[in-house]
Image (cartoon, rainbow, N blue to C red):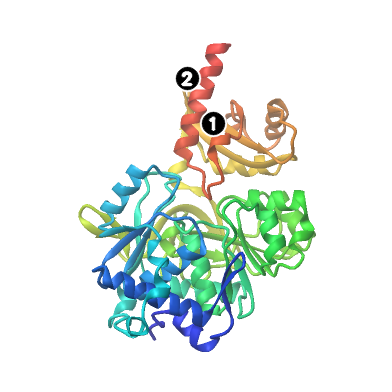
Amino acid sequence: MAPPLCPVARSAKRWPNAAALREGERRWSWAGMDEAAMRIAVALRERGLRPGDRVAFSLPAEADTVLLFWGCLRAGLAVCPLNMRVPAERRAEWAQAAGCKTLLTGAETEHVSTLGQAAFTEGTDEPPGAGDRPATIVYTSGSSGAPKAAIHQFANHVYSARASNERVPLRQGDSWLLSLPLYHVSGIAVLFRCAEAGAETIVPAQDMPLLEAIAKYRPTHLSLVPTQLQRLLDEDPAVLAHVKAVLLGGGPIPPRLLERAVAEGVPVHITYGMTETASQIATTPRLAPADLPDPGAPPLIPGSARVTVDGEIEVNGPTLFMGYLTNNGMERPETDAGWFPTGDLGHFDERGWLHVSGRRDNLFISGGENIQPEEIEAELSRLQGVAEALVVPVEDETFGARPAAFVRASGSQPLDGDALSAALATRLPKYKIPIAFLPWPSEAGEGLKPSRRQFAQWAGKRLAHRARIE
């Protein structure tokens, strides 16, 4: 059975007066948010946009942006949210490459209250078959290569939200803090989960620290990356006392962090996913001490993931995207049987939980030996004082390449490279021990997935500079 085309409309009918969206003192019920989205849809139609057209926006994660997002989908448009941190010229190139007819600025939300009731009710239903049309165009993070424009159907997001809400229970009356940008599929996923469940989306001010936002709004659900959870536990773990679920993902998770979070009673759910699957691939129920230290995660939808004989994870199912936009049209790399190769390596344990060991394209060769950076990162993350680690290859005249590590300290004291090297020597062969331990670059920001290409460039420059000084 095809999913309903607009979960906002469904929630507006089921829970018209329930809380749907909040930003500071501004609040919308589900009926109010659906009405605002409908009015925006009419305004967009009056601008000449038609169902099937593609539109881009580059806006902060604010309540007006959420309304604009739903209004675009109500108008039958495909939405392409662009990363605000990317230079404007590059954003324009991405919008053009995605076939967008216009770049929305947010002004569409400023005049919705002036539209008449006749305009509100006229011609705003999605066309027949709209569940199969493109709904979003999301650029991948580009963490291990050039960003790609991934197209999702409306149904991809709906099925992902439904499966997620079963694994990480979300119900009417709950609330999810939108702490992720809407140009990431993980941010969009929060909107769909809340719309499917009738839960409230809370949008904090852009400059509000995460700890302050949690204390102010007291959300029941959070999406965090490991460094965010580490900071919360260091600053004030009591702020998480009322939280029902923390969805933790976006990269490797230090076992020490998991152990601490579970011991503190934090309701952690580990998740592994990618843009191409409308967010999640595998997600755990709430973790228990018996699941540690390396829990893995069961597939979100049974039978939607498999591991090939050479260790690559492949995915399929109703959350899988339509394809990438290319110069030759839309393309989706897949096997003859219709499975999508993720490029990630992994295995299933005896429980059927999926474990991810790294990306195939991150592997490099040093002196004839294969090095998987994620293996070294995992060992570093187990060490006292290490909050995050990322390993990249740097050129070497003798070995071709050698590993170098960026390390983020969990405290205020800098880490001792010699001590880290000595600790790794008890767990790794010599050729896998990084030749340098570099402090985490301040210019890296707080992105969900660090760009390995960028980190490799930084490592090359810093080691070259160090060599000149020496």
Image quadrant assignment for residue 242: bottom right
Q: Residue at x 50, y 79 (%)?
A: 32
Q: How many marks?
A: 2
Report which residue position mark 2 lands on. 398
Query: For the point 35% across and 52% down, which residue is it?
Result: 148
Q: Secondary structure at mark 2?
A: loop
Q: Amino acid at mark 1?
A: Pro
Of helix, strand and loop, which one carries label 1?
strand
Q: Is 336 on the left-hand or right-hand side of 243?
A: left
x and y, in percent, of residue 99 in the image: 25, 57
Q: Position of residue 198 (x, y in %)?
A: 55, 79
Label 1 crowd (10 A; few <14 / some 14-19 / many >=20): many
Q: Quadrant of the C terminus?
A: top right
Disc number for residue 403:
1
Dot placed on the residue nearer the N-terminal end, 2 or 1: 2
Query: At x 41% / y 83%, what residue is drawn?
Result: 4
2 and 1 marks in contact (CB < 8 Å) = no
Circle 2 packing at 10 Å, graded few (<14), some (14-19), many (20+), is few
Q: Is residue 223 above or below residue 327?
A: below
In the image, residue 113 above or below residue 9:
above
Q: If the image is split into quadrants, where does the N terminus sit? A: bottom left
Q: Residue furthest front?
A: 114
CA–CA distance in space, label 2 to label 1: 13 Å
